[in-house]
Amino acid sequence: MKYNLFISYGIAVVFGVVLGFLSAIPIGAVQLQVIKKAIRGLRKPAIMIALGSGTSDLIYGSLTLFGLGGFLASARFQLVFYLMGTAVLSFLLYHSIREYRHHVAAADIPPSGRKNEHAVGYMTGFTLAITNPSIVLWWIVGFKVFLDLGLFSEATFILRLVFVISGVTGLVGYLLILVVVIHRRHRDIPDRVFRRMNLGLIILFVVLIAYFVYKAAGFLCR
């Protein structure tokens, strides 16, 4: 009996890791930021972005699987969410425009600047991920599909916890693999690739800011 339970939890871990891994594959703002830092040779800031994103997903996963998802749907939370997202994205837009105009190599950044890159990297990963609540759908659908396998008679606290941690591990794991692979080859990647990525991020941030302002205005006008 205990052996079967051990196997079932093992399957839950594997399922959660695979789910998290797959959720991180589609290219989004977080992935682009990770790639951009890795291309510049800033491995640690890229890792901090991945950890910040993982922290955000841990929060969303916990809120979703532990029955607190209704909080995410409240009008007050969504207004704060869109206003905060607009502010964060505006900062990142400004930073990306500066980097696009004045490319600075990692070797030219002083030690104090690199420490600041670490803190900014974590907050960048966290805020970009927290402004993407669509990850909730991955948690809801993924956990429902897993329960349909019939390995557990009920969704216990331990099972939910294991599933959330496994999912976050898979997501962060994919981003870390991305960092390692790109960082090893970053010297072979021309600067024009970096500039094109910055241009892509600028366009993405402009679109997201416009959307967030539109949504926030809708709540304020009610």
Image: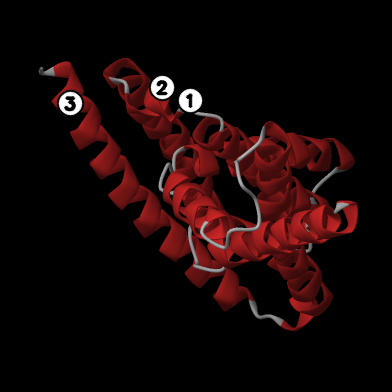
- Residue drawn at the location 74% of the way across and 53% of the way down: 169
Q: Secondary structure at mark 2?
A: helix
Which residue is at the front of the view, 159 or 36?
159
The label shown at residue 68 is 1
Q: Secondary structure at mark 1?
A: loop
Which residue is at the front of the view, 141 or 79?
141
From the image, state whether disc 3 or disc 1 is nearer to you: 1
Q: Residue 172: x percent and y percent?
A: 71, 54
Quadrant hosting residue 81: top left
> Is 57 positioned to the left or the right of 100 in the image?
right
Q: Residue 83: x percent and y percent?
A: 35, 25
From the image, state whether disc 3 or disc 2 is nearer to you: 2
Which residue is at the front of the view, 34 or 108?
34
What is the spatial separation of the Cα atoms under label 2 and label 1, in whole angstroms? 6 Å
Q: Secondary structure at mark 3?
A: helix
Q: Earlier in the sequence, mark 3 or mark 2?
A: 2
- Residue drawn at the location 88% of the way across and 51% of the way down: 2
User: Taking 24 as reference, is 75 above or below it?
Assistant: above
Q: Residue 46: x percent and y percent?
A: 73, 54
Q: Earlier in the sequence, mark 3 or mark 1?
A: 1
